[in-house]
Image: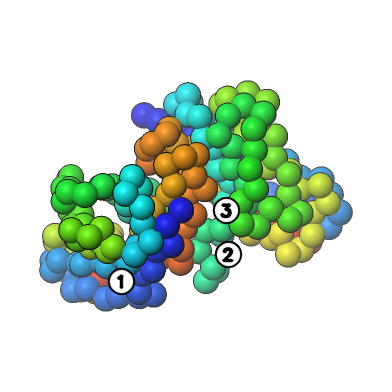
Amino acid sequence: DVKVTQSSRYLVKRTGEKVFLECVQDMDHENMFWYRQDPGLGLRLIYFSYDVKMKEKGDIPEGYSVSREKKERFSLILESASTNQTSMYLCASRDEPGELFFGEGSRLTVL
Amino acid sequence: DAKTTQPTSMDCAEGRAANLPCNHSTISGNEYVYWYRQIHSQGPQYIIHGLKNNETNEMASLIITEDRKSSTLILPHATLRDTAVYYCIAPNTNAGKSTFGDGTTLTVKP
């Protein structure tokens, strides 16, 4: 079975902390994505990557950065977490072309 | 990515067919239409995709109009477990963003 694994299902952080959300896929996919999902707002794309060390901004990149040092791993970084970044974060990967495979999500609460 | 438009919500009786429409009037010739669904608190799950022809798999059928400006996802015999948010997307094939809209909340009622 294909698998996208997000490192933490639930995190609680304090304002100003640096936060790392890790995502690993075992399908050798070229493309990886980070979304956030808030009630009533659907999935919004933060960043995506189409190759190792390559990244592109999505629709809401402000306050976030990403890292893709290895093909299987795509990390989302909150340099200084703020309360408005409390959200569900979803990672996905896909081949080109192909369907998206999603992880289970990481629910982040920033106090 | 082509912009997609879906109704905000729909109801369906259990055992009846659920027909979920999606408008993608700006779709280009090589962009596929993908459908996903998301059950509360889980990551979205792929259902089906198509380019021009109608498609069917064990989960659903996809009807794409001849001009490709719209499509309909059909769940032939909806069950209570099909209650979910359904998303239609048409990602750009050149390392596209895979942007999601707000989807349709389908409620299957007994």
Q: Tag count in the figure?
A: 3
Q: What element carries label 2?
A: loop
Label 1: few (<14), some (14–19) or many (≥20) C-alpha neighbours in 10 Å: many
> Label for residue A10?
none
Along the line of sight, the residue nearer the viewer: B23 or B18:
B23
Location of the C terminus of chain A (image quadrant): bottom right
In the image: residue B78, left or right of residue A51: left
Residue B19, given in percent of the width and then of the height, sits at 20, 67
Q: What element carries label 1?
A: strand
> Residue flagged by tag 3: what amino acid is it?
Leu
Among the two numbered marks 2 and 3 on one chain, the one whose residue lies closer to the N terminus = 2
- Of badges 2 and 1, nearer the viewer stands 2
In this rendering, the answer to whether A27 lies above or below A57 is above
| Residue at the (46%, 67%) spot, across then down | B102
| Residue at the (28%, 63%) spot, across then down | B69
- Of badges 2 and 3, nearer the viewer stands 3
Distance from Cα at disc 2 to Cα at disc 1: 20 Å
Distance from Cα at disc 2 to Cα at disc 3: 12 Å
Distance from Cα at disc 3 to Cα at disc 1: 26 Å
| Residue at the (68%, 49%) spot, across then down | A11
Location of the N terminus of chain A (image quadrant): top left
Q: Quadrant of residue A52 in the image?
A: top right
> Label for residue A45?
3
Residue with the mark numbered 2: A38
> Residue flagged by tag 2: what amino acid is it?
Asp
> Residue flagged by tag 1: what amino acid is it?
Thr
Along the line of sight, the residue nearer the viewer: A85 or A94:
A94
Residue with the mark numbered 1: B107
- Furthest toward the right, the residue is A16
Label 3: few (<14), some (14–19) or many (≥20) C-alpha neighbours in 10 Å: many
In the image: residue B78, left or right of residue B100: left
| Residue at the (76%, 54%) spot, across then down | A63
